[in-house]
Amino acid sequence: MRGKVILVCGKIASGKTTYARKLATSLPAILLSTDEIMLPLFGQNPGANYHVLLAKVESYVLKKALKIIQLDMNVVLDWGFGTRERRQKVSAFFEERDIKYEWHYMDTSSETLRRNLNKRNGEIESGNTASYHFDFEIASKFWDMFEVPTKDEIDVWVTRKDAYMTPLNLIWILNAAGDKVLMCKRHKQPYLGLYNCPGGKIEAGESDLESAYRELQEETSITDADVTLVHVMSSTYPLSDIRLEIFYGKLSRDVQVHGDEKELAWIDITEDFCDMTRFAGDRNLGHIWECIKWHRENGELE
């Protein structure tokens, strides 16, 4: 199975490089950046030949990406891709070679762009990072010239929250009778020895729903043939850098559950899920269940 390419698109100071590095670590993938070649070779001011030099570097990096993919490894391209025409040409480059690719767009507010720019310039001036220095006036011109992609161009639309928070899912599964919820006992901290719902990390390139089905099958052997998952809630925890996506489903039939090393148990829905001596989440499971119950009582969930 050949690797795939993730193309990170966004304005100057949108957080592309931070996001690309996280992607490269989580996939895993080889991160390729034109800046990492241009800066050491030509410095902050490459002169009038900048665009000619950049075109040559981009061509070189694309060839390197092909060689890496042929080794069954993933690639993350950290470029700006500031015009629709440029994005179309790069898409065509990989399509012609039958290589799977994804576009990720950094959707960053003007306020955040300014804040990131000031922070980056300060780090450059203090020698703590190697990147291009842009004053606000020059950066503003580039921001204005950037052609924001349409939804049909982009596979993953990344907000600043998504870029800097660890995405997780939690899946609340009822049995076919609707009177028990499937839980697993945690074997490590946090919440060692307490019951929690199945779930885990949303991997780079996955949709939230795809990730929920994957985690559910890995941890319980329940598949999309047994249950239809519904996205019911989202919660963010800024101090912990966590984004939690909560899914609900009721089994269409009784199934045998088994999975990885976690101990599984069917827990009666009349239990007090706010009991912190038995259940993980600091009472959050109780809140989640109350929300699901409300939607069930109103006929919005089965």
Image (spheres, helix red, strand yellow):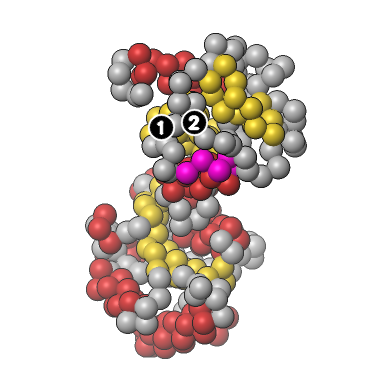
Does the image show residue 44?
Answer: no
Quadrant for the C terminus in the image: top left
Q: Quadrant of residue 141?
A: bottom left
Identify which residue, 174 or 43, lies in the foreground: 174
The amino acid at mark 1 is Ser
Does the image show residue 103?
Answer: yes
Residue 64 percent location from the top left of the image: 51, 84
Q: Which residue is mark 1?
A: 252
Give SS at disc 2: loop
- Mark 2 burial class by Cα count in 10 Å: few <14, some 14-19, many 20+: few
Residue 29 percent location from the top left of the image: 56, 68
Tell how many labels.
Answer: 2
Identify which residue, 261 or 47, lies in the foreground: 261
What whole-number distance in Å separates the C-alpha atoms at marks 1 and 2? 7 Å
Q: Which residues are magenta?
A: 219-223
The residue positioned 55% from the left and 76% from the top of the image is 72
Give SS at disc 1: loop
* In the image, residue 222 lies in the stretch drawn in magenta: yes
Q: Which residue is mark 2?
A: 254
